[in-house]
Amino acid sequence: MTSWERQASDAERWESCYGEEYGIEVRGIRGLTYENSSELEFEPRYPLFGGWRATFIIGYRVPLEDYLFEAPDGRRYLNFTFGCPLVETIVNKLTIKVVLPEGSKDPSAVLPFTVNQDLQVKYSYLDIVGRTVVVLQKDNVVPTHNVPFQVYYTFKPIYMLAEPFMLVSAFFFVFVASLAYVHIDLNIVKK
């Protein structure tokens, strides 16, 4: 079993997932929550440290109030740790994806070393313009790369009203259409 422990101020509010390159067929996965930390134990199909090469994905969601802050210039920034969450692990190619809220503008990542940065757009339910995804990639990541990094971006809170406005408009349109259908007389001859 391979174990990964994560310290958190509120360890009960995190979700995790584990997947392999050729499917999510895992023999054993177990998430444990302690008072000040969380631990994910998983057993991949192939041995990790036996000469076999294994590509896998560890994803997790954390509460934003512990990692999201506002800069003095009005921009928001995410402060997180770069690197592999597995202790003392060397990674050939590490990819970190930070999905920003819909309507975010001018994202920039600040790291103490060079990485390949790319921007993508991800569409989710009811998204109009899509969510900006900051993709950070680095080859040959060692434990000394496990340092904090920041992703700065600007965000206008008015974008949070787009999805509720779309839903209210759709319900209103259906209501008006059904009202018009009930009251319109489509007969050619009047009775």
Image (cartoon, rainbow, N blue to C red):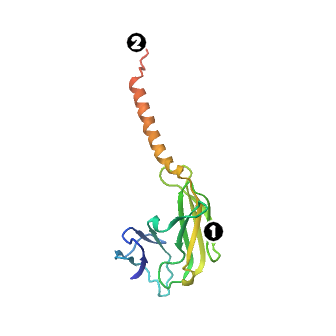
Residue wearing tag 1: 117
Query: Which badge, 1 or 2, is on the more N-terminal residue?
Result: 1
SS for callout 1:
strand
Residue 88, percent from left and from top: 50, 85
Foreground pick, 158 / 56: 158
Neighbour tally class for label 1: few under 14, some 14-19, many 20 plus, Cα within 10 Å: some
Disc 2 crowd rating (10 Å Cα; few below 14, some 14-19, many 20+) is few
Q: Is residue 52 above or below residue 122?
A: below
Which residue bears the numbered disc 2?
A: 190
SS under mark 2: loop
Q: Position of residue 102 (x, y in %)?
A: 54, 55
1, 88: nearer the viewer: 88
Looking at this view, name the residue that lies furthest to the front.
72
User: Residue 76, located in which quarter of the rendered image?
Assistant: bottom right
Instruction: Give the side of residue 1 with respect to residue 117, left or right.
Output: left
The N terminus sits in image quarter: bottom left
Identify which residue is drawn at 42% across, 13% down: 189
> Could you say where residue 33 lies in the image, as x and y percent from the top left?
35, 74
Q: Residue at x 41, y 81 (%)?
A: 3
Type of residue at label 2? Answer: Lys
